[in-house]
């Protein structure tokens, strides 16, 4: 979010056909819940296009990058790395330390698709679990970002939008932005 160190979400792995929808949801969740950028595998071309289209229509700031080898982003990252995995330490026990690290500098949040190599666990400053039960990486990312920002991301302003959702008690309303 603006005036805070960056949060970048790195999607490790993408199996075309199998992970298309999940990778798209990782990108859209990252955008909606306060991340500054998402890095996706080049094989996830449709997810890249969708996230860029949503950002163009509903605003940013948010950047989508596609790379051939996502692990090189992880290896080169100079700051804090948080890997979301059901095998990690409970988020609630590590949250204050992670928030302090984020106040001090950028954070890379790693979410996997297929089996994550041991080197990712070793490279991470924190291997965090949003419960130690099997569930979606999208859910983990959403809960993590909401906790990282203490809910502030829910009221963030959006810049350069051409469309805006108008909250309704009933029905749907999306207006053009003047």
Image (cartoon, rainbow, N blue to C red):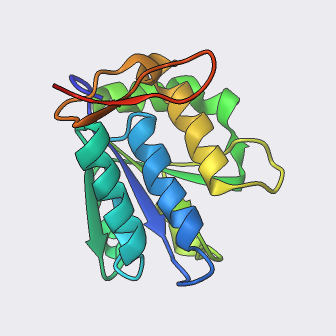
Instruction: Give the side of residue 42 with respect to residue 59, left or right.
Output: right
Coordinates of residue 115 in the picture (x, y in percent): 65, 76
- Name the residue located 59 percent from the left edge and 26 percent from the top edge: 171
Above or below, comparing residue 170 to residue 141 in the picture: above
Q: Residue furthest right?
A: 133
Above or below, comparing residue 159 to residue 29 in the picture: above
Q: Is residue 117 visible?
A: yes
Q: Where's the C terminus, which quadrant?
A: top left
Q: Is residue 74 visible?
A: no
Coordinates of residue 89 in the picture (x, y in percent): 70, 43
Quadrant for residue 38, please give it. bottom left
The one nearer the camera, 26 or 75, is 26
Coordinates of residue 92 in the picture (x, y in percent): 68, 28
Coordinates of residue 61 in the picture (x, y in percent): 22, 38
Instruction: Give the side of residue 37 with respect to residue 125, left or right.
Output: left
- Name the residue located 34 percent from the left edge and 79 percent from the top edge: 42
Instruction: Give the side of residue 110 with respect to residue 129, left or right.
Output: left
- Name the residue located 29 percent from the left edge and 21 percent from the top edge: 157
- Name the residue located 56 percent from the left edge and 83 percent from the top edge: 15
The one nearer the camera, 1 or 57, is 57
The one nearer the camera, 151 or 48, is 48
């Amino acid at each position: 979010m603006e005036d805070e160190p960056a949060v970048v979400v790195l999607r490790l792995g993408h199996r075309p056909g199998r992970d298309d929808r999940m990778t798209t949801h990782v990108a859209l969740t990252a955008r909606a819940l306060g991340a500054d950028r998402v890095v996706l595998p080049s094989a996830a071309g449709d997810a890249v296009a969708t996230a860029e289209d949503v950002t163009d229509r509903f605003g940013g700031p948010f950047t989508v990058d596609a790379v051939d080898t996502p692990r090189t982003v992880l290896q080169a990252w100079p700051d804090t790395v948080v890997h979301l995995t059901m095998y990690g330490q409970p988020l609630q026990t590590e949250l204050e330390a992670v928030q302090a690290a984020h106040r001090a500098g950028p954070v890379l949040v790693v979410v996997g698709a297929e089996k994550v190599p041991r080197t990712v666990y070793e490279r991470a400053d924190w291997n965090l679990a949003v419960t130690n039960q099997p569930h979606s990486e999208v859910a983990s990312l959403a809960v993590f970002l909401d906790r990282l920002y203490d809910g502030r991301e829910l009221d963030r302003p959006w810049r350069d939008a051409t469309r805006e959702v108008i909250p309704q008690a009933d029905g749907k309303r999306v207006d053009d932005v003047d």
